[in-house]
């Protein structure tokens, strides 16, 4: 039996409010754009490898974060095979009597979501076994180790010509870690089943419907942001200082109500299909911890912005930060 180390790269929606995502929903949250694999010989040395780019058919624009991490863009993938052809090419390369190994559950879940979405169940695959779980248990790690952390633990130096987040390179690095295990064959005890992928919807109740703006700066200067209302009495409030940015898509501030004291204001941004910025606002009574946190962050923010302005000559563009925001994670049910 041959061990084959498999790694995948995938794209995601630019926005979960996009037309494409609304059409396919949770049936295709991540669309695969690269298969990378390394075939091991009897001594667990890399004997052969393959890298197959995949042309996206639904999320045609590559998310800026994915493009930055993988180096893959729409132009690079334009002439690549579609998913079915790529999967057939991969299984043909695998041959017979082989088992697939991955680092963690993510690749397993994304692979099978794509298989089901593109109706490729007729292409047989063996179980996928999880090297990460075996490695973490072997080294008695409290939490599962990432691939980079595992390499550092085993003193494996990355090749300066082989960047991470390339499916072939990551498969190669995984093979090097796999070889260090005292009983590599034990990985066969860790066959993994895919988990259902769903988009994590926000649990915060939004007090206002989304308002549309041309830019984040315009939204932050809007009447809705500058003069929110008290969630208890509806009185128009005055902000106690400026909004602070928690992340590229979240801003918070404190406001004062004459009747009900301090109010915490939360703004959340997302991008629609036309590139417009949609702002939603939530308000709630603020705790002492909320007030202390916001006031501390306001002072820190002013210092950081002054330093940034001195070094760069201009402030960062919040629209560009929102577009490139890393706001996703593996959304398992």
Image (cartoon, rainbow, N blue to C red):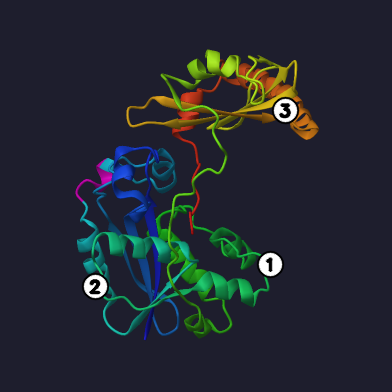
Decide which of 302, 331 is in the foreground and name it.
Answer: 331
The residue shown at (53%, 32%) is 249
Pick whichever of labels 1 and 2 is earlier in the sequence: 2
Residue drawn at (75%, 24%) of the image: 295
Mark 3 Cα-neighbour bin, 10 Å: few <14, some 14–19, many ≥20: many
Residue wearing tag 1: 142
What residue does disc 2 label?
A: 123
Residue 130 in the image: above or below residue 261: below
The residue under label 3 is 294
- Determine the secondary structure under disc 3: helix
Crowdedness near tag 1: few (<14), some (14–19) or many (≥20) residues, C-alpha within 10 Å: few
Occupied quadrant, residue 140: bottom right
- Report how far apart the C-alphas of labels 1 and 2 lie in the structure: 37 Å
> Dividing the image into 4 quarters, which one contains the N terminus?
bottom left
Q: Is mark 2 on a helix, strand or loop?
A: loop
Q: Nearer the viewer, residue 219 or 317?
A: 219
**Residue 291 in view:** yes
> Magenta region, mostly helix, strand or loop?
helix
Looking at this view, is 44 or 64 the one in front? 64
Of 94 and 119, which appears nearest the observer? 119
Q: In this view, does 40 lie to the left or right of 134?
A: left
């Amino acid at each position: 039996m041959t061990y084959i180390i498999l790694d995948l790269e995938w794209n995601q929606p630019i926005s979960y409010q996009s037309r494409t995502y609304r059409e396919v929903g949770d049936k295709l949250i991540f669309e695969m754009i690269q298969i990378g694999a390394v075939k091991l010989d009897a001594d667990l040395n890399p004997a052969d490898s393959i890298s197959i780019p995949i042309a996206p058919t639904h999320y045609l624009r590559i998310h800026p974060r994915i493009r930055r991490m993988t180096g893959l863009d729409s132009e690079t993938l334009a002439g690549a095979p579609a998913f079915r052809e790529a999967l057939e090419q991969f299984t043909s390369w695998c041959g017979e009597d082989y088992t697939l190994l991955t680092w963690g559950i993510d690749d397993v879940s994304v692979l099978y979501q794509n298989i089901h979405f593109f109706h490729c169940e007729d292409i047989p695959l063996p179980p996928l076994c999880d090297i990460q779980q075996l490695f973490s248990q072997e080294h008695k790690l409290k939490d599962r180790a990432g691939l980079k952390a595992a390499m550092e633990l085993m003193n494996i130096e990355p090749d300066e010509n082989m960047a991470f987040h390339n499916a072939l390179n990551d498969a190669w690095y995984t093979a090097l870690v796999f070889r260090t295990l005292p009983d590599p064959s034990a990985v066969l005890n860790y066959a993994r089943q895919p988990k259902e992928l769903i988009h994590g919807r926000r649990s915060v109740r939004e007090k206002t419907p989304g308002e549309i703006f041309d830019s984040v700066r315009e939204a932050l200067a809007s009447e809705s942001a500058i003069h929110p209302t008290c969630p208890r009495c509806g009185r128009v409030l005055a902000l106690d200082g400026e909004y602070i940015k928690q992340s590229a898509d979240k801003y918070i501030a404190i406001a004062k109500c004459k009747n009900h004291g301090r109010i915490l204001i939360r703004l959340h941004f997302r991008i629609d299909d036309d590139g417009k910025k949609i702002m939603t606002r939530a308000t709630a009574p603020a705790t002492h911890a909320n007030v202390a946190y916001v006031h501390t962050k306001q002072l820190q923010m002013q210092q950081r912005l002054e330093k940034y302005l001195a070094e760069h000559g201009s402030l960062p563009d919040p629209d560009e930060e929102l577009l490139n925001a890393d706001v996703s994670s593996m959304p398992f049910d």
